[in-house]
Amino acid sequence: MRTPLRIAVLALASLTMAACDKSDSSSSTPAGGSGSSVNNAVNNAAGAASNAAKDAGAAVSNAASSAADTAKQKLQAVTDAISQKKYDVADSTLKEVESIKSSLPQAMQDQVTSLRTQLDAAKASAK
C-alpha cells in the first residue's frame, strides 16, 4: 500500500541527483540559469510525491472502510447463527472476523469479543 509513496520518493531523489549532476557538469553556466530548472524539477517531484501520498492515503481509507463493512456483515451473520443455534457456522464466521480484529474500530473489536463470549456460553449450555 505504500508503493506509490516509495515510487514518488525515489523519483524525487532521482530528479534531485540528476539536477545536481547537471549543475556540477555545467560549471560555466551562470548560477541563475540552472537553478531555475533545478527548482522546477524539485517542485514537480514534490508535487508528484504529494499526490502519491494522497492517493495512498485514500486507498488505505477505502480498504479500511471496506474491511469494516465486511466485518459488520459477518458479525450480523454470527448473531443470526447464534440465535438459530447454528454454532458451527457462527464459530467459523466469527473466526474470520477475529483474524482481522486488530484492524477494526474499537467498537467492532468489542462486539467481536462480546459475540465470542455469547457463542462460547451458548455452546456450553447446549451440551
Image (spheres, rainbow, N blue to C red):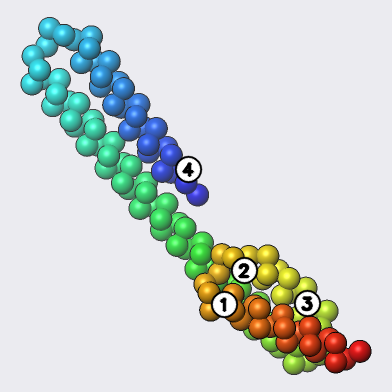
Q: Which amino acid does label 3 sit on?
A: Asp
Amino acid carrying label 4: it is: Thr
Residue labelled with disc 2: 101
Q: Is residue 70 above or below residue 117?
A: above
Whether residue 88 is visible to the viewer of this picture, yes or no, is yes
Q: In which quarter of the image is the C terminus?
A: bottom right
97 on left or right of 42: right
Left or right, residue 48 beside residue 126? left
Spatial separation of the CA atoms under disc 3 and disc 2 = 15 Å
**Circle 2/circle 1 CB separation < 8 Å:** yes
Q: Which residue is rendered at x = 29% and y = 36% of the image?
A: 45
Q: CB of mark 4 within 8 Å of CB of mark 2?
A: no
Tell me which residue sits at (30%, 21%) in the image: 18
First reached walking from the N terminus: tag 2 or tag 1: 2
Residue that label 1 marks: 108
Label 3, on which residue? 91
Q: Where is residue 74 in the image (x, y as percent from the top left)?
A: 66, 77
Q: Relative to residue 31, is residue 110 drawn left or right?
A: right
